[in-house]
Amino acid sequence: MNDTEGAFKKWWRAVGLTLAMTGAIVLAVALTPPARDAVAKSIRGLISATPAVQATNAVTLNGVTVRVDHLDRTPAGQVIHVSATDIGGASAASIGVRGLTGADYLASAGGSNGWDLRLPPSMKTLIIDEITFRDGGTATVELDIPSSGSISINRVLVIGRYPIWLTTGTWVDDGPNGHVFRIGFHTAPVAGRRLGGWIVDGVGSSIIEGPNAITGDGWLELMPNPDHSAPPGHATMSFTDPIVEVDGPWVLPLG
């Protein structure tokens, strides 16, 4: 994965994420474990994890089709243009190509414009391990944040097509961030897709840590900033613009 893609992911995952919101759709429910399983099952039904389907110049896996649109061979190497489309219409943001460095990504516009990649002359197969998409969806949750101590939240939100389980909230001292209210959450892969980040608005600034790629666990911290009052109290939090990481590999022979 190149430096630009790494910075993009860090920006979505670990920086304070606040945006003005309009037209929020309320989609927050307190669910028992069986109900959470039902939510996950219904989401999996939208995108079935299937074996890769190979065409002449394209591979489809986990609802994503990757195409080799153009290939030029020169004595110095190969330059290839690839594009990716999602069955649900999400916009591709970044790709992780096995064996390439940051300098090999000649143009990374993403979306419908795809990517220009420089490949070694000896490379006979293009392998893409992961593709990140900007998807759509909005969910809100209302919380009564205490002035001290902890609370059990135990709610599942569905941001677009992807569930996130808010587990607990507790006041912690987090070094330079100060005294903050930390909300734990858990996500799980759905048909080869992981919810990697989102935008939060509603109370204070927010910093997201995680979700961990292996466990799916992470936390969200709320703290004051000049434009928002700090907790405690009644809060309405909006979750929008999910970033979704889709697992490969997409394997494309170069001929």
Image (cartoon, rainbow, N blue to C red):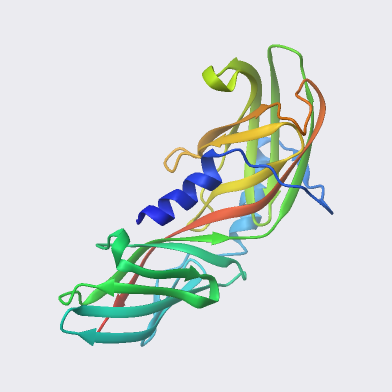
Q: Report the side of 40 relative to 121 (left or right).
A: right
Question: Residue 98's x, y, as percent?
Answer: 28, 62
Q: Report the side of 26 relative to 174 (left or right).
A: right
Number of disc labels: 0
- For the residue pair 8 and 219, the one nearer the viewer reads as 8
Q: Report the side of 123 relative to 220 (left or right).
A: left
x 53%, y 43%: residue: 13
Above or below 25: residue 48 = below
- For the residue pair 25 and 110, the one nearer the viewer reads as 110
Above or below 207: residue 13 = below
Indicate the quadrant containing the C terminus: top left, top right, bottom left or bottom right.
bottom left
x 29%, y 79%: residue: 79
On the image, which quarter does residue 106 sit in?
Answer: bottom left
x 65%, y 46%: residue: 199
Indicate the quadrant containing the N terminus: top left, top right, bottom left or bottom right.
bottom left
- For the residue pair 119 and 34, the one nearer the viewer reads as 119
Residue at far top of view: 148
Question: Residue 143's x, y, as percent?
Answer: 78, 29
Above or below 247: residue 238 = above
x 70%, y 56%: residue: 137
Residue at far front of view: 226
Question: Residue 42's x, y, as percent?
Answer: 65, 56
Question: Residue 20's x, y, as percent?
Answer: 77, 47
Q: Report the side of 24 relative to 172 (left or right).
A: right
